Image (cartoon, grey):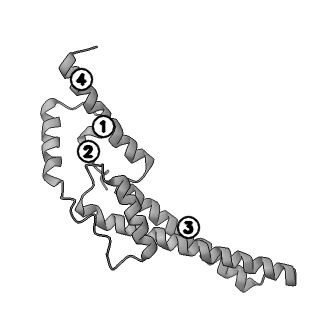
Amino acid sequence: MARPRKPVDTQTRHNTQAEIQRQKFAESLVQTGREDLAETSIGLMDATARKEYARVLRSLVDLPVIGNLDRTNLVGYCNYYSLHRKLEGKIKKQEAQIKKEEKELGEASEETNAIYFELLRQDRLTCESMIRFEKLCGLTLDSRLKVADAAAKQVEDELQGEFGDI
């Protein structure tokens, strides 16, 4: 399986000017509109997921690489976030049940422990999926720093082109 491609601005490879221009042109061809991103009344999301979608969208609005086609990934991330929050609540209730049984009986029942560990397993899988969607959407610190580095490099190049080597 091939590695995911990086935008030309985030590449560290030494490309010729012709390669850079060709890659920038190719990137401009695949950029999508952004008009559908603001729509949060998607039937696939509950209230918690909609709130997270609005919060994340405010953070991503300045990134030029996010478009309508990334909406599905954002919805996926928000749904897993919502599921994670629900599982956290269930885990806390189960922990309280375990403490209650330990206080009354000296130890928790096997059934209570089994439910607790199943909830922890589900939460771990949910978090792994959430992280996968974070990476796809550019929500990780690494991906934001790559975009910021590319923007800073572009400003430096413009200044150098205007004023020469300082």
Neighbourhood count class around disc 2 (C-alpha, 10 Å): few under 14, some 14–19, many 20 upward: some
> Taking the image as drawn, is residue 36 in sight?
yes
Relative placement, left or right, of 87 versus 55 is right
- Residue that carries the numbered disc 3 in the rendered image: 124
Work out whether mark 4 precedes mark 3 in sequence or the reverse, and give the earlier one: 3
Neighbourhood count class around disc 1 (C-alpha, 10 Å): few under 14, some 14–19, many 20 upward: some
Nearer to us of marks 4 and 1 is 4
| Coordinates of residue 152 in the picture (x, y in percent) | 32, 33
- Residue that carries the numbered disc 1 in the rendered image: 150
Cα separation, mark 4 vs mark 1, equals 14 Å
| Coordinates of residue 85 in the picture (x, y in percent) | 54, 71
Work out whether mark 2 precedes mark 4 in sequence or the reverse, and give the earlier one: 2
The reply to whether the C-beta atoms of the residues labelled 2 and 1 are less than 8 Å apart is: yes
Looking at the rendering, in which quadrant would you find the N terminus? bottom left
Work out whether mark 2 precedes mark 3 in sequence or the reverse, and give the earlier one: 2
Amino acid at the residue labelled 3: Arg
Amino acid at the residue labelled 1: Ala
- Residue that carries the numbered disc 4 in the rendered image: 159
